[in-house]
Amino acid sequence: MKDLLRTHIDCFDDALGGGIPKGSVVLVMGEPGTMKTSLTYSMMYNCAAQDDLDGLYITLEQRKDSLESQMDAMGFSYEDVIGRLSVMDMAGYRKRTQVASGGYWLDYLKKCVATRKEVGNVDILAIDSLDSLEALSDFTDRRIVIYSLFEWLRDCDFTTFMICEEGPDFLFEGYEMVPQKNEAEYLADAIFSLKMQSISDFDVQRRLRCVKMRGQGHDTSYFALIFEPGEFKVAKAMSA
């Protein structure tokens, strides 16, 4: 029997065959506005509150106070998980130090995670976002760097949520449309894809899909993603 991590997204764990195999590196991908950060934080929050699992959320874009205020307003009170879920503010550190981009940032992230692991348990890690980390670290050979990072995370024995933007499938190079490869998608153990789906001339619906899950039978259908204060849930998407 596999050891699974529950997402606590109502009805979604059933679609995943019970949850995410622990130790996986999970990409949470989507366009801006699809609630990637909120969904990831909610999974970590509920694992801390209901399963007594320790989480570390690393933000490279949004300040810690802004993130916690936003999540409190959504019904995920930080006070309820103090000691279980902590936020590391690399966005604030960037502003204070003004260190130039380069390999320093990737090394610094690893050092921070290793230090946090020494002083307390870490079951779940979130990095928000891979795009920011790549921009800061100037990945020279993207596939090799991402492979090395993902293998390091697996060796740490975390379940990791890696937030990233979902880019276009094709880009113009000269006069031709060229397919774009995202190495992270090939190297990740699981992919959660979020999108905004038009359902009428006036309305859009957020949708969630598990594109990939190594070692676990799962439903690959799109689900309507519904948020109510303090809770995410899914329902079968019936329309276009």
Image: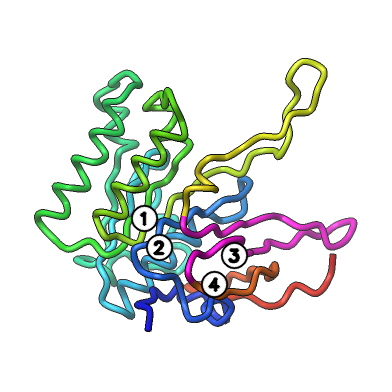
- How dense is the environment of label 2, judged by Cα within 10 Å: few (below 14), some, or many (20 and up)? some
Identify residue type, mark 4: Phe
Q: CA distance from mark 2 to mark 4?
A: 15 Å
Which one is earlier in the sequence, the residue at label 4 or at label 3?
Answer: 3
Structural distance between the alpha carbons of marks 1 and 2: 6 Å
- Disc nearest the viewer among 3 and 2: 3
Q: How is the image coloured?
A: rainbow
**Residue assigned mark 4:** 232
Q: In the picture shown, does residue 179 fall above or below 200?
A: above
Question: Mark 2 or mark 4: which is in front?
Answer: 4
Tell which tag, 1 or 4, sits nearer the viewer: 4
Specify start and end residues of the magenta stretch as a single range.
189-215
User: Where is mark 1, residue-wise?
Assistant: 68
User: Label 1 amino acid?
Assistant: Glu
In the rendered view of the protein, which quadrant contains the N terminus? bottom left
* Residue found at the very far top of the displayed protein: 174
Q: Earlier in the sequence, mark 3 or mark 2?
A: 2
